[in-house]
Image (spheres, helix red, strand yellow):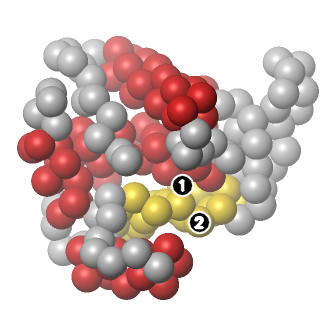
Amino acid sequence: MSIDVNNESGTEVDEQAILDIARYALARMRIHPLSELSVIVVDADAMEQLHIQWMDLPGPTDVMSFPMDELRPPSKDDDEPPQGLLGDIVLCPEVAAKQGAEAPTQHSTDEELQLLTVHGVLHLLGYDHEEPDEKAEMFGLQAAIVDGWRAEKGLTGPSPAPTVS
């Protein structure tokens, strides 16, 4: 799995954890091990520009996903997953810090960025949360991936509650 993490935000973040949880999420979703992903961490101004340009919405947001080859998890366990370019995930630590602090189970900026990374991966794989049934599926999968990764890493305490809208 080729995953690049570029921090252009000027804020110190745990790039290794972002890389690790992205790799874990892609393996859990059975994405081809030679697929490629890019994660970019930007400041609030850059995120706001992307949010306006691509969503026509004001202000910065927490995470944006830009799919490339529209890869999907294999439908059956014995199917060979396709290889390709997953796309880009863009994260904003300033928004993540605010969301983590305001969440029902307060958590760190890095924990929020880990959650947002998984959220971005799922969007790249075609998951969405516009409809209630889609939201239940996506957020359930997101929680299972974050919980599994945290357990594998031996991290204790409650997992961050979904704060992504």
Residue 160 percent coordinates (x, y): 25, 30
Residue 66, label in figure: 2
Nearer to us: label 1 or label 2: 2
State the SS at label 1.
strand
Residue 86 percent coordinates (x, y): 67, 56
Image-quadrant location for residue 82: top right
Question: Does the image show residue 28?
Answer: yes
Q: Which of these two is toward me, 88 or 153? A: 88
Q: CA distance from mark 1 to mark 2?
A: 15 Å
| Count of picture labels | 2
State the SS at label 2.
strand
Label 1 with label 2: CB-CB less than 8 Å: no
**Residue at horizontal 54%, vertical 33%?**
132
**Residue at horizontal 24%, vertical 39%?**
111
43 to the left or right of 11: right
Residue 47 percent coordinates (x, y): 34, 75
Question: Does the image show residue 122?
Answer: no
Above or below, comparing residue 146 to residue 57 in the picture: above
Above or below, comparing residue 152 to residue 96 in the picture: above
Q: Which of these two is toward me, 108 or 31? A: 108
Residue furthest to the right in view is 79
**Residue at horizontal 15%, vertical 30%?**
104
Q: Amino acid at mark 2?
A: Phe
Residue 81, label in figure: none
